[in-house]
Amino acid sequence: MSTATFLGVHTGSFSTPAVGNPTVAMVEAAYRHHGLDARYLNCDVAPGSLGDAVAGARAMGWAGFNCSLPHKVAVIDHLDLLAESAEVIGAVNTVVATDGDLVGHNTDGQGFVESLRTVVDPTGLEVVVLGAGGAARAVAVETALAGAASVTVVNRNARRGEELARVVTAGTAVPATFVAWDRTYAVPDTTDVLVNATSVGFGDGDALVDVDLDSLGDGLVVADVVVSPPRTALLRAAAARGAVTLDGLGMLVGQGALAVRHWTGVEPDRDVMRAAVERALGV
Ligand code: NDP
């Protein structure tokens, strides 16, 4: 008698617009590489249909799914539980079916820290985060939880920036301060890591954040969360001044790899995932 089974692991992504999201290529490459009977469906889900989409995933027994813009906060209303990271950050990018519950996690910041650790251990470092949106929240909170000595949030919108500094200070043991970004920002020379977590540079390789480039010295680590194009103008300028640079693809691969591990129990090969996403983006 055949012992074949015909029910694979179902996963996917809910976002809109979904057409430019390369995650499917990266995750399915990992599934194929590890011989997993698993699928990942990239779904374009309008805000008004998010509840139905989550109910569908629940009804069909999906192992979990990613949420991307604009659903990372709204999805919380449709879940049963939140993991600590998602609770502190206040947003979910990965949902995992666990013992009958849908549990919201946030692997964005953990993916960033995994990528950061390839160049430096964040323990005891002074970190400056540019931006206070979803990516900045994840980066600031997880870098603090990973042991940074201090976090400085630099943002144009003071309400959002102050709120993020409050979230980091209240949710982690690390003091965070807010700096209003109302003029060219000079990176203090005590800074160890500068992270561009704004959307500046997305889709425009020449767009540059308003930072004093002469403050990007030797010994600084400069990271960007922007994925496309990955070699942003900030990273090019920082490398030219002797800084160590880290592109946003490392964070993208890291957060995706952590999601795959949640859904399948397999620790996926990051190099395979990075090669797949680079191919997908034409890097
Ligand atoms: P949000 O819209 O939530 O936040 C955008 C942030 O960028 C805000 O803080 C905004 O400031 C700031 N900003 C926008 N334009 C400027 C400007 N001209 N000067 C200074 N600040 C500016 O976006 P997300 O946080 O979701 O996404 C940000 C980036 O991170 C995107 O490029 C996204 O693709 C990327 N990303 C990468 C991931 C990865 O895995 N590598 C994961 C998730 C996101 P203000 O509040 O003042 O308006």
Image (cartoon, grey):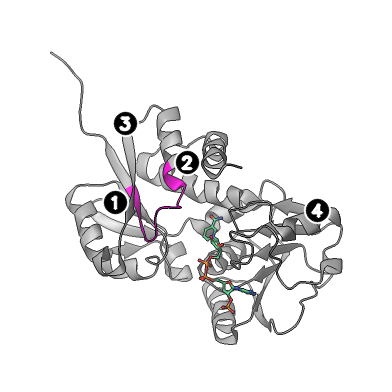
Asked if the residue under mark 1 is in contact with the one under mark 4, i.e. CB atoms within 8 Å, the reply is no
Q: Residues within 10 Å of mark 2 (few under 14, many from 20)?
A: many
Q: Residues within 10 Å of mark 3 (few under 14, many from 20)?
A: some
Q: Secondary structure at mark 4?
A: helix
Q: Quadrant of the N terminus?
A: top left
Q: Which mark is first along the chain, 4 or 3? A: 3
Asked if the residue under mark 3 is in contact with the one under mark 2, i.e. CB atoms within 8 Å, the reply is no
Give the spatial CA distance, label 4 vs label 1. 43 Å
Give the spatial CA distance, label 2 vs label 4. 27 Å
Q: Which residue is mark 4?
A: 239
Asked if the residue under mark 2 is in contact with the one under mark 1, i.e. CB atoms within 8 Å, the reply is no
User: In the image, what residue type sits under mark 4?
Assistant: Ala
Q: Which residue is mark 1?
A: 98
Q: Indicate which label's residue lies in the foreground, 2 or 3.
A: 2
Which residue is outermost to the left? 1
- In the rendered structure, which segment of residues is drawn in magenta? 12-24
Q: Residues within 10 Å of mark 1 (few under 14, many from 20)?
A: some
Asked if the residue under mark 1 is in contact with the one under mark 3, i.e. CB atoms within 8 Å, the reply is no
Q: Secondary structure at mark 1?
A: strand
Q: Residue at x 66, y 49 (%)?
A: 117
| x, y percent for residue 3 | 19, 19
Asked if residue 106 lies left or right of residue 247, the reply is left
Q: Which mark is first along the chain, 4 or 2? A: 2
Asked if residue 150 lies left or right of residue 17, the reply is right
Q: Which mark is first along the chain, 2 or 1? A: 2
User: In the image, what residue type sits under mark 2?
Assistant: Met
Asked if the residue under mark 4 is in contact with the one under mark 2, i.e. CB atoms within 8 Å, the reply is no
Mark drawn on residue 26: 2
- Residue in the foreground of this view, choosing between 116 and 226: 226
